[in-house]
Amino acid sequence: MTHRRRLRSFWNRVDSGGIHQAPREWQSWLSDTGSLTQQIERAISKKLEVLVLNDGRQDLNSDESRYFHFKIKRCRIREVLLCANGEALVMARSIIPTPSLSGSNQSVLRLGTKPLGAVLFAKSRTSTKKKALRKIAFLKKRDCFWRICQKKYPSLATPVWSRRTLYKLKGHPLLVSEVFLPALLNY
């Protein structure tokens, strides 16, 4: 019964079997545990361009707030497009609570056009061995997260596959959601 309830939720754990509902060409992108930026750069044999759509303090929606046990209502949200040859391949939304920006994690404040994965994967491999919580979703126009993304990227297709991962950077949580755009399959 618990398994059935888990599959009915909007975001499903990768290991819940939901990954098998995705078309085969999306499964490796959705389930990969490494840096998405590095995986794409290997596929296209060049560096990705990062186009920053937004980087500032915003309110979380209730779905995102749940990852922080509803203790955080407002925090830094960074939204970017990962592009190759001027074409958007992935839209990423990173939620970075204020405590996650303290101490040696302050490099996250100075990302500019550098991908967040460059910081996460440079540090996290040595700081934690615990597996990050990863969920996937098939986003449609009626979904809140699709509407949030569509406001920042008006040509967002529907439906699209997405993954969401709760990382820890030196013990502090960061929530990263990545929407896979159709152009990614060209690579």
Image (spheres, rainbow, N blue to C red):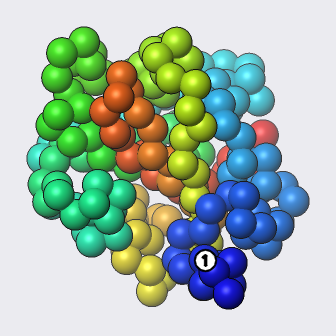
Q: Quadrant of the N terminus?
A: bottom right
Question: Residue 173 lies in what quarter of the image?
Answer: top left
- Can see residue 158? no
Residue 55 horizontal/vertical position (percent): 21, 40
- In this rendering, position of residue 77 left or right of residue 17: left
Please state which of residues 67 and 177 is positioned toward the viewer in this rendering.
67
- Give the position of the C terminus as an image quadrant: top right
Taking depth in this image into account, of 15 and 108 the one nearest to the observer is 15
**Image spot of residue 64 (x, y percent):** 33, 62
Vertical relation: 3 (above or below) 28: below
Single out the residue that lies furthest toward the right: 24
**How many residues crowd around disc 1 within 10 Å: few (fewer than 14), some, or many (20 or more)?**
some
Task: Identify the image quadrant of residue 153.
Answer: bottom left
- Which image quarter: residue 111? top left
Residue 145 % position (x, y): 40, 69
Measuring 64% from the left and 24% from the top, which residue is drawn there? 38
Q: Is residue 166 left or right of residue 179?
A: left
Instruction: Report the front residue among 4 and 34.
Output: 4
Question: In the rendered image of this protein, does residue 60 appear above or below residue 53?
Answer: below
Determine which residue is flagged by label 1: 6
Position of residue 96 relative to residue 15, above or below, is above
Name the foreground residue: 81 vs 30: 30
Q: Position of residue 144 (x, y in %)?
A: 37, 77
Residue found 24% across the figure and 32% down from its top: 100
Q: Is residue 9 visible?
A: yes
Q: Residue at x 26, y 40 (%)?
A: 96
- Looking at the rendered structure, the number of numbered marks drawn on it comes to 1
Amino acid at pointer 1: Arg
Direction from residue 183 to residue 118 in the image, left or right: left
